Image: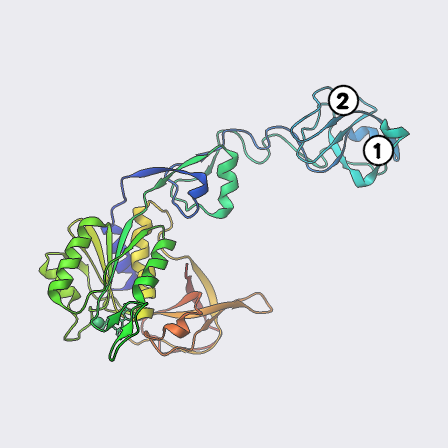
């Protein structure tokens, strides 16, 4: 049994970064991992820009108010007034428009009043030089790196990519994942389970999380607890995918054949027991060129082990800098039991109390098969090994579920 940190280290050591880089359209890029640094190709703003609708003025002309200035032109967004503005003059200006040379402040329209049928403006309040102007290159200078290769493209980054002309962007290739549920009790979701059967859910769960990790997913046919069928399907999958993720059949039961099948096929096994609750029998290896994760069958164990291990590999394959789940510190909202011999990752809901403290409330759940309780989880609480009762109010590390 190896510690979780060790298992994650092994995953990162054994996971190759996919060589291929794709050039994709900006509109399809959210969630993908940048394979190039993003460089500003212009200053931002590209010119001194008005931040308000109003009048471009010289601050020294409006020290004593009200001050009357002659309106000599108009600068609109996309159609600037490109002359020298002299003392005693003002230019009507709109948000986003270039500030004319000679002007050093913008007074907002609410503090002005046009008179003499629009040829003169009365500035009602003085402004200091620089007011409501963003200077050229104040936000970014042309040539600066604004995003780095390895960052995942979020919706918040799209404006940056668009503004610097990245109509197409280089990203890591999506890993191809095959998911394979094993167990003779399983029927697909569109079937009515007969006696002794249950509907399978793991393939769908893994596919959902894998797609959140940037992978493309193929669901393989359900596989019964039959060593020959397991070997046949695993061999075929390993030839067409980058990562094969199985669930079920890795514990100590008489019909748990996944690990044996992998070994008989000559797979290299990197680990097969992790000090983790839930998810101790997780297997990680390589079959041919494909990485293989043999996850336990219980639905909650699947979510925990997928996100700790398989997700890390899928992110590393795409060249992501952040491969593991985001960590935070939170305070335990009620007493919870740890495990004597293993680290735990327990499902929890987060909330913030009146003082602004982040609280992690462990779900009341019935163990690793309780996917109904798990449905509310937004985070996992990490408890160290050897902890029995942990009291409400204890600060702990949590990881955020994607
Ligand atoms: P196993 O790891 O194969 O011993 O399975 C542990 C438990 O998880 C058993 O109760 C299985 O019926 C259940 N299980 C295994 N695979 C799936 C699946 N794909 N969907 C839902 N439950 C499963
Ligand atoms: Mg089974």
Q: Is residue 90 left or right of residue 349?
A: right
Residue drawn 65% across the image and 29% down it: 78
In which quadrant will I find the C terminus?
A: bottom left
Where does the image place residue 86, in percent across and percent down from the top left? 79, 21
| Above/below status of 80 relative to 260 | above
Q: How far from the left and from the top, in percent, is residue 166?
A: 46, 34
Q: Residue at x 29, y 59 (%)?
A: 309
Q: Residues within 10 Å of mark 2 (few under 14, many from 20)?
A: many
Considering the numbered disc 2 on the image, is that residue within a helix, a strand or a loop? loop
Q: Would you call the spot at circle 1 few (<14 residues within 10 Å), some (14-19), or many (20 or more)?
A: some
Residue at 41% x, 46% y: name it.
Answer: 152
Name the side, left or right, on which 247 lies relative to 60: left
Looking at the rendered image, the quarter that the N terminus falls into is: bottom left
Element assignment for label 1: loop
Foreground mark, 1 or 2?
2
User: Is ligand 1 closer than 8 angstroms to the Cβ of mark 1?
Assistant: no
Q: Quadrant of ligand 2?
A: bottom left
Instruction: Report whether 294 appears left or right of 374.
Output: left
User: Does the rendering let one see residue 241?
Assistant: yes
| Residue 296 against residue 165 in the figure, above or below | below
Q: Give how far across and how far down residue 215 sits, in percent.
A: 33, 51
- Rendered residue at 18%/52% (across/down): 238
Q: Do tag 1 and tag 2 residues touch (Cβ < 8 Å)?
A: no
User: What is the distance, in whole Å, between disc 1 and disc 2 at their CAs?
Assistant: 17 Å
Return the disc, 1 or 2, that comes first in the chain's sequence. 1
Q: Which residue is mark 1?
A: 63
Choose between 297 and 385: the one closer to the eye: 297
Q: Which labelled disc corresponds to residue 85?
A: 2
Return the residue found at the far top.
83
Viewer-proximal residue among 253 and 217: 217
User: Residue 150 placed where, x, y %?
Assistant: 38, 43
């Amino acid at each position: 049994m190896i510690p979780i940190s060790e298992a994650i280290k092994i995953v990162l050591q054994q996971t190759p970064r996919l060589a291929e880089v794709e050039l994709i359209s900006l509109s399809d890029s959210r969630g993908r991992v940048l394979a190039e640094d993003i460089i500003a190709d212009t200053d931002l703003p590209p010119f001194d820009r008005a931040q308000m609708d109003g009048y471009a003025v010289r601050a020294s002309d409006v020290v004593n108010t009200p001050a009357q200035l002659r309106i000599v032109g108009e600068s609109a967004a996309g159609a600037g007034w490109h002359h020298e503005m002299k003392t005693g003059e003002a230019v009507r200006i709109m948000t986003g428009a270039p500030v004319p040379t000679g002007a050093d402040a913008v007074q907002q329209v609410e503090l002005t009043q046009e008179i003499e049928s629009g040829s003169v403006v009365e500035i009602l309040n003085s402004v200091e030089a620089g007011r409501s102007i963003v200077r050229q290159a104040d936000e970014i200078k042309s040539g600066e790196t604004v995003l780095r290769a390895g960052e995942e493209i979020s919706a918040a980054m799209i404006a940056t990519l668009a503004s610097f002309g990245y109509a197409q962007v280089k990203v890591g290739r999506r890993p191809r994942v095959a998911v394979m549920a094993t167990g003779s009790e399983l029927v697909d979701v569109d079937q009515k389970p007969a006696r002794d059967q249950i509907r399978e859910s793991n393939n769908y769960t893994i596919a959902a999380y894998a797609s959140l990790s940037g992978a493309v997913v193929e669901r393989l046919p359900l596989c019964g607890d039959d060593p020959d069928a397991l070997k046949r399907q695993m061999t075929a999958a390993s030839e067409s995918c980058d990562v094969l993720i199985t669930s079920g059949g890795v514990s100590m039961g008489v019909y748990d054949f996944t690990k044996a099948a992998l070994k008989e096929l000559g797979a290299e096994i990197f680990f097969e027991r992790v000090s983790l609750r839930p998810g101790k029998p997780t297997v990680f290896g390589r079959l041919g060129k494909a990485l293989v994760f043999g996850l336990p069958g219980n639905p909650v164990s699947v979510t925990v082990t997928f996100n700790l291990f398989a997700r890390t590999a899928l992110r590393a394959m795409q060249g992501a800098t952040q491969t593991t789940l985001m960590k935070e510190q939170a305070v335990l909202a009620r007493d919870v039991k740890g495990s004597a011999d293993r680290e735990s990752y327990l499902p929890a809901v987060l909330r913030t109390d009146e003082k602004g403290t982040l609280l992690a409330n462990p779900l009341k759940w019935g163990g690793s098969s309780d996917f109904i309780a798990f449905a509310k989880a937004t985070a996992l609480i990490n408890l160290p090994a050897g902890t029995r009762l942990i009291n409400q109010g204890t600060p702990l590390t949590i990881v955020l579920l994607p």
